Amino acid sequence: MTMPQWFSAWSAKAAIKYLKCLIWLGALIPVSRLIYLGVTDGLGANPVEFIERSTGTWALVFLLLSLSITPLRHLTQQAWLIAVRRLLGLWMFAYACLHVTTYLWLDYQFDWADIVKDIVKHPYVLVGAAALLLTLPLAATSNQRAIKALKQRWKILHKLVYVIGVLVLLHFWWLVKKDVTEPVIYSLVFALLIALRWLPFSNNRKS
């Protein structure tokens, strides 16, 4: 390995390390904020709903961040960016689990009869549950051993992220009753990321 190649490899490793540290710090801020607001009685008149909305929103944010890595990699020509995509996806899964746990535990105290009634009354809950179930195989295979074992099937499996994105946005749209500003913004961002992922680089992939 020549000196420029060695320096480039070292720079990429250092960038990955620092970016992962920033992601960890950034990802811990929302949950730390919830803990602080809970201790200081700052969660508002409906604390459970506040926690549900917050954790659900951050799950969506991390989903969109993970989807942004591929177009960002192509735009910047920095291949090492792909190394942080799995971490962003795992944080999406973590906040999705917190979101669902808040619903099952704090909202309904694991009263399955009432939960079934709520699902019948509000089908968006079922859509959200479907999105979470689809994230389970993605989280379980987010490691090098699974990538080596599944080979090309790993890429096919992880294309479920697009289905998850659609289900999450549908869940959000269905949940919001009057002000649809946030669902519109997140939907536009999702559509833009999908367009950037496929349209500008399709010719490059074919070549």
Image: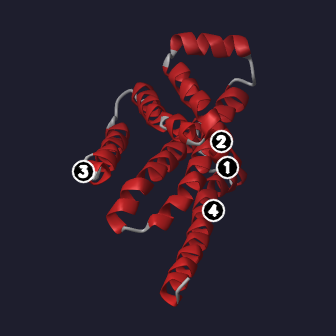
| Amino acid tagged 1 | Asn
The tag earlier along the polypeptide, 3 or 4, is 4
Judging by the rendered image, the residue that carries numbered circle 1 is 143
Q: Using the numbered discs, state the Cα–Cα distance from disc 3 to disc 1 in whole angstroms.
A: 30 Å
Q: Nearer the viewer, mark 3 or mark 4?
A: 3
Judging by the rendered image, the residue that carries numbered circle 3 is 203
Q: Is residue 47 visible?
A: no
Depth check: 79 or 84 in front?
Answer: 79
Q: Using the numbered discs, state the Cα–Cα distance from disc 3 to disc 2 in whole angstroms.
A: 30 Å
Depth check: 84 or 109 in front?
Answer: 84
Res 94 → quadrant:
top right
Disc 3, SS: helix
Judging by the rendered image, the residue that carries numbered circle 4 is 24
Q: Which residue is located at x 42 percent, y 25 percent?
A: 174
Q: Position of residue 42 (x, y in %)?
A: 62, 50
Q: Using the numbered discs, state the Cα–Cα distance from disc 1 to disc 2 in whole angstroms.
A: 6 Å
* Residue 34 vertical position relative to residue 79 in the rendered view, above or below: above
The residue lying furthest to the bottom in this view is 3
Callout 3 touching callout 1 (CB < 8 Å) = no
| Amino acid tagged 2 | Thr
Q: Nearer the viewer, mark 2 or mark 4?
A: 2
Q: Using the numbered discs, state the Cα–Cα distance from disc 2 to disc 4 in whole angstroms.
A: 20 Å
Judging by the rendered image, the residue that carries numbered circle 2 is 141
Q: Which residue is located at x 51 percent, y 41 percent?
A: 155
The tag earlier along the polypeptide, 2 or 4, is 4
| Amino acid tagged 3 | Asn
